[in-house]
Image: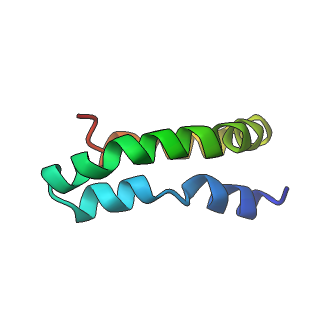
Amino acid sequence: MDKAIAKQVAETSIIPSLNSACDAEEYAGFAKTIKSIAGLAATDILHKIFAIYPDIEKEIDDQITRFVRLD
């Protein structure tokens, strides 16, 4: 997989967008569903991308640390 495409796939997540666009109550309403779907759909793909491009995993981790509330 091309690295630019791999990075786009890894970064294409609605969680950071919803987290920054919703108030805490709205976000909580979406969080359970998002976590279930994201976990099932993305885990295998992301593991493969991160195995090929570990620097993308670090970038994503850094973004999560900066922008995502872990309530």
Q: Quadrant of the N terminus?
A: bottom right
Left or right of residue 15: residue 43: right
Left or right of residue 43: residue 28: left
Q: Quadrant of the C terminus?
A: top left
x and y, in percent, of residue 49 in the image: 74, 44
Left or right of residue 25: residue 61: right
Q: Is residue 63 visible?
A: no
Residue at position x 72%, y 63% in the image: 4
Q: Nearer the viewer, residue 50 or 31?
A: 31
Instruction: Relative to 35, say whether 2 is above or below.
Output: below
x and y, in percent, of residue 22 in the image: 21, 61
Which residue sits furthest right?
1
Within the image, what quadrant is residue 39 found in?
A: top right
Q: Nearer the viewer, residue 53 or 24?
A: 24
x and y, in percent, of residue 44 in the image: 72, 37
Q: Nearer the viewer, residue 30 or 45?
A: 30
- The colour scheme used here is rainbow
Residue at position x 48%, y 39% in the image: 36
Residue at position x 72%, y 44% in the image: 45
Instruction: Relative to 9, say whether 62 is above or below.
Output: above
x and y, in percent, of residue 56 in the image: 63, 46
Instruction: Relative to 63, say whether 47 is above or below.
Output: above
Count of numbered labels shown in the rendering: 0
Left or right of residue 67: residue 59: right
Residue at position x 29%, y 54% in the image: 19
Q: Is residue 2 visible?
A: yes
